[in-house]
Image (cartoon, rainbow, N blue to C red):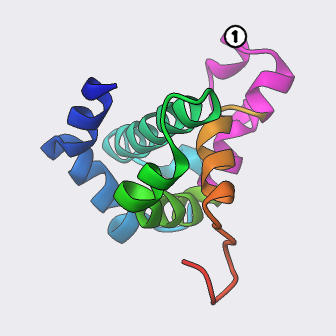
Amino acid sequence: MLHLFETLSKKESRKAREFVLLGLKKRPWKSLTEDEQDNLTSVWLLYDNVGLLEENGFLEKKIIEKMWGDSIKSCYCKSKETLDDFRKNERVPNLRDVLTEDEARNYIPHFENLAKKLGATCGDKKTV
């Protein structure tokens, strides 16, 4: 778990979150550059791991909320449309080869579940 905390604090992780929060424009997954895709998937997977730890009782929600709550909610809302697009098998060439159709539709579920648990209501002006 300490490794996760260190990873979230690394310069590369901070830059990836900065891209999602400040640089990501609403566009289909396929139109993103490789660097943009790398930044986005880095954030999704890191926060997916945080969500998995929370779901399994290894990390308390109140700790997550204090440390990364706003970032998780904001990153989720900023990237939700692209994540939904990413999950469509035809837009991601190798996704169908490694995941079932159901798994592809629910790819990176812990990040989404955690964001919602923390109160992300994308589009609601009161939150995020």
From this view, report whether residue 65 is shown above or below residue 30: below
Q: Where does residue 6 sit, x and y in percent of width and height?
A: 20, 34
Residues in magenta, as a range: 82-105
Residue furthest left as drawn: 11
Examine the residues drawn in magenta and state their main secondary structure.
Answer: helix
Q: Where does residue 12 sit, x and y in percent of width and height?
A: 19, 42
Q: Where does residue 126 sit, x and y in percent of width and height?
A: 63, 88
Q: Is residue 6 left or right of residue 54?
A: left
Q: Where does residue 37 sit, x and y in percent of width and height?
A: 42, 42
Which residue is the site of mark 1? 97
Magenta stretch encompasses residue 43: no
Residue 20 in sight: no
Q: How many marks?
A: 1
Residue at 47%, 42% (x, y): give it.
Answer: 47
Residue at 66%, 72% (x, y): give it.
Answer: 122
Which is nearer the eye, 118 or 108? 118
For residue 90, which quarter of the picture?
A: top right
